[in-house]
Image (tube, grey):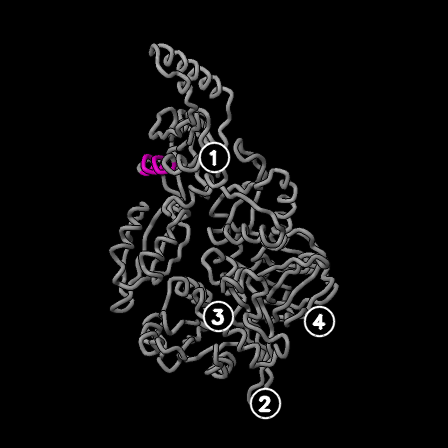
Amino acid sequence: MQHIRNFCIIAHIDHGKSTLADRLLQYTGTVEGKNLKNQVLDDMDLERERGITIKSHAIQMNYEEDGENYVLNLIDTPGHVDFSYEVSRSIASCEGALLVIDATQGIQAQTIANLYQAIDHDLEIIPVLNKIDLPQAMVEDVKDQVVELIGCDRDDILATSAKTGEGVEDVLRAIVDRIPPPEGNPDAPLQALIFDSIFNPYKGIIAYFKIFNGTLKKGDAVKFYHTEKEYEADEIGILRLDFEPKDKLSAGDVGYIISGVKTSREVEVGDTITHIENPTEKPIEGFKHVKPMVFAGIYPIDTEDYELLRESIEKLQLNDASLVYEPESSMALGFGFRCGFLGLLHMEIIQERLEREFGVNVITTVPNVSYKVFEKNGEVHEIYNPSELPDPTKIEHIEEPYIHAQIITKSDYIGPIMNLCIEKRGKLLNQTYLTTTRIEMNFEMPSGEIVFDFYDKLKSISKGYASFDYHQVGYQPSKLVKLDILLNGQPVDALSTLIHFSNAYNFGKRICHKLKDLIPRQQYDIAIQAAIGSKIISRETVKAYRKDVTAKCYGGDITRKRKLLEKQKKGKKRMRQVGNVEVPQQAFLVVLKLND
């Protein structure tokens, strides 16, 4: 155990985490020849294109220093805020962390959020300044920020360039010298933390774990503590570029277990593996069921693709246990699924994977969050869809989820960012100057306000300099109303939203105006209305096509023209009663892009 080092890399998106991991694998000889490529640990095309890590990875390296052989386990973590629970489990499996900071951008919000998690788990932090080869690198300024943030010595900060390989040897030496070896008792009852799982079509679910105490042998009868499922360890081993089977793993080791699990629900990240015969008395702390934050309906564009969509979502859930779904139907869109996501990026990725990996084209309805509805008779319902809202006369009050948002930006953009957050019903908690030009602002705001376009607006008003991180802080009472969109008096359920009453009039007016341009004209007038209950708050009319029925009258009495016009009017009225208004697909997407 004295020669094992378990570490992770903490960084904001695009600070060079995957590139540094590539260099470490190259310098330790773990990846060579044809396997040497950029972003070795990011094996999804989507990850490579976007330059983000969606699934965390783990890999073992061998490193020699002063004649001693060391085993280094890199437990890679996703950088995006949506995947913060996966990050916390990866951090719990380590004894140290490389804090990677871009020398051209300085410290960002997600870096700080993940750093605090690492400090909570008493990890040894090694600050690494990356991208020092770029001409715009502010090495000394960023070093000052790091010293102020974590209180280390300036000499402890390693200056590297993952792209050119400069300073990578120093990082490897620091991992061995500064990060403590794992603690644990190989003879104690087995206690192993699952920090990730992947799906293999031939072997089922493969769980990645780190052993805290005890020893695990091939063929052992094991159970998962929280799901209470029992299995046999058919194959165990260590994580190299490919799986490397072993007969035995003990305290301090990081590895994988294959035990014939077929459904992802049975393997939960954060669960504890223990022996059936000699179980541990208490599981490893920190386990929680991952709860979705954002909900949206996913429907096939072609209704015949419903079965294909169902199979695709089932397969996708094997790879991503945090995706939650249930069937639902809509009057406007037919049959589909109500899905729960960790955040907006997660939703975007799932939608893109459905289209790429399974070839299903889908429509996603307006994303929303879950609300708690308190009825006058004392019942409490959690609703994810505006159509589930009970009769307004039965409702005592509605509570919506709130988040604590942390924004780090240049001080030039304080005004516009404050305006944006206050517009979104945010409340400023505090603000702190990190340096003379960088400020950290903390807001409390409703989750429902950030699921639309908050992140895009924040990036555009700060010219890309602001970074954003958030976590949920519970529910608060709020004055919410259900906004319905009616076409010729008929509600279109897919366009209904739950919205704060102060935004309802403005929002309804903008939707009506936008739909007027999108809904094709018919032979009769189409009324587009936004309504709260029975009160109409906005209206637009799509004018009818008109045949000139008076063209054949070339003189004579005016009553001849009137007679023809009256006849046409009656025909149009009858047509309206039996006619259906077709809503084009763009209309459902328009709500998402109202501010374009």
Which span of residues is magenta-colored?
Answer: 503-511
Dot 1 crowding, Cα within 10 Å, few <14, some 14–19, many 20+:
some
Residue to which mark 3 is pinned: 17
CA separation, marks 2 and 4?
A: 25 Å
User: In terms of sequence position, does the residue under pointer 3 or pointer 1 come before the other?
Assistant: 3
Q: Are marks 2 and 4 in contact (CB under 8 Å)?
A: no
How far apart marks 3 and 4 lie (CA) works out to 29 Å
Q: Which residue is denoted by mark 1 in the rendering? A: 381
Residue placed under numbered mark 2 in the picture: 67
Q: CA distance from mark 1 to mark 2?
A: 64 Å
| Mark toward the viewer: 3 or 1 | 3
Q: Amino acid at mark 2?
A: Gly
Which residue is pictured at 42% across the width and 26% down the height?
544
Which numbered dot is residue 389?
A: none
Residue behind mark 4: 246
Callout 3: few (<14), some (14-19), or many (20+) C-alpha neighbours within 10 Å? many
Front: mark 2 or 3? 3
**Are circles 3 and 1 on residues that touch, CB within 8 Å?**
no
> Is 106 drawn above or below residue 201 in the view shown?
below
